[in-house]
Image: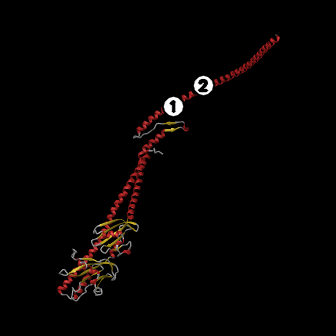
Amino acid sequence: MAISNIKTRILVFVVFFEFVAYSTIQLFNHYSYKNELQQLNNRAIKQTFAASIARINNLTRLMERNVTDLAIAGEALFLLKKQQKLAMEVVEARVEDILVTNFSSFPEAIGGGIWYEPYVLDESVRYFGPYAYQKHADIEFSWELNTPEYDYHNQDWYTLASKQHWGREQERIKPIFWTPPYYDDAGSYSLMMTVDAVMYDGADTEIGLATVDWSLKELTAFLESVRVSANSFPFLIHAHSEQFLSYPKQPELVMKTPRLFSWGDMLLDDRQQGQFSLLENQVIDEVLYNVYYYRTRDGFIFGSLTPLADMEREIDAITTVTLLAGAAIGVDFIIIMIVLIRFLFSPFDKVLALIKQSIIHKAGGEGVVIRRIRYSETNEFTPIVRALDDVYHQITAYMSEIVESNEQLSRSKLEVHQLNEELEDKVNIRTQQLAVKTQEALQSLAQLKNTQQQLIEQEKHAGLGRLVAGVAHEINTPLGI
């Protein structure tokens, strides 16, 4: 059905235009939101990673600074022993004071010690390895590891330095070594790492190591709480040993190699340090993930497995909010347009009502009566009303002429009808007269036929008489002879 109402046309056009424009905007916003959200999420993830990496770096730097301080203290104690020829009892008391004081103000570490090479402090002392550790919020000092049975000189954490030439190639005040992660078998049974610092004498000769033991429990607990999305999984890898330090998605893989996964190979093979990186569209357990990761200069790789569905869910949530808000705005706009159109067309509606009232249909469909439009306002419709009044006047005049013509026509029709009736009477009379004449003619014709028949018969008898007379004559003559 065609739409003839101007207001309806305008409203339909507005609704259609808004629908097309809004759909286009929504489509554009969907892609722009997706890109913007991706960038925003990347920035948020980078900030999250920055905070986490800062904590890792702060702790590793703190451990390195502390072990360096212990190494310097161990070197100073060695020099005092050599220069002042302190008794071993005095050296033992001082080293105990150094370790207890250090770890009392350093709760981030679970313990540490100062370990000397054989016979460097005294020609009769092969093992000199005092150790202090945290125990129930107190610091315990121990010589339990200073025994031939433990033989710390041949422990992996100690030989790590000697096997690498005591770190001569390192550009540090004190060469630093990090052991691979291991479980503490001495008492805490927690995952830990040990950082070593080389001690030198005045002639730049190695005299032993200072160590700080770092429990990874607090750090891994913190990192496991870092979630870049609702269903993401953080992880922490020690690159040098190629082992998981934390992997909440599969905790049983802690201390196992990440090379069990293809994305783990790519992480470990990527040697770039101090840079935020991304592996896109990695399939893990039939789910697509983005793998965000950062490799520190100390060989720790912190990362997160983030499902792509989380990103799409965020986009859908924002798109839904935008859609609802846009729909509400669109409905409000349509309502405003309806009210505005009604307001703008109210003069038109008034004029239209006056026009309808000026045309009155007579009962029984016998015609219409047109009255003059009385419009007192002065606006754009005033000239139209005046012109329409003129048209009404002309129509009224034409209608009067038509009525008069119809009356004349009616009179003419009546006269014609009367003439027709008279003519029919004359025709009937003439028809009757003609019927009588016709009957008379038929009767005359019948008489004529009878007369003709009689004449024929008489002619036949006369001819027969003449024939008989001739025959008789012809017979009588010979007979007479």
Q: Position of residue 298 (x, y in %)?
A: 27, 73
Kind of residue at disc 1: Ile
Instruction: Residue 480: give its label.
Output: none
Instruction: Compare residues 467 and 76 and report the one nearer the observer.
Output: 467
**Quadrant in the picture for the C terminus:** top right
Residue 194: which quarter of the image? bottom left
Q: Position of residue 266 (x, y in %)?
A: 33, 68
Residue picked out by circle 1: 402
Residue 91: which quarter of the image? bottom left
Instruction: Compare residues 139 and 243 and report the one nearer the observer.
Output: 243
- Mark 2 or mark 1, whichever is nearer to me: 2
Is 437 located above or below residue 350 in the figure?
A: above
Relative side of 239 to 78, left or right: right
Q: Position of residue 267 (x, y in %)?
A: 32, 69
Instruction: Compare residues 273 and 217 and report the one nearer the observer.
Output: 273
Q: Position of residue 377 (x, y in %)?
A: 41, 41
Is 451 located above or below residue 357 in the figure?
A: above
Specify few, some or many for label 2: CA neighbours under 10 Å numbering under 14, 14-19, or 20 or more: few
Residue 122: which quarter of the image? bottom left
Secondary structure category for the residue under label 1: helix
Disc 2 and disc 1 in contact, CB within 8 angstroms:
no
User: Is residue 104 in view?
Assistant: no
Q: Earlier in the sequence, mark 2 or mark 1?
A: 1
Secondary structure category for the residue under label 2: helix
Residue picked out by circle 2: 419
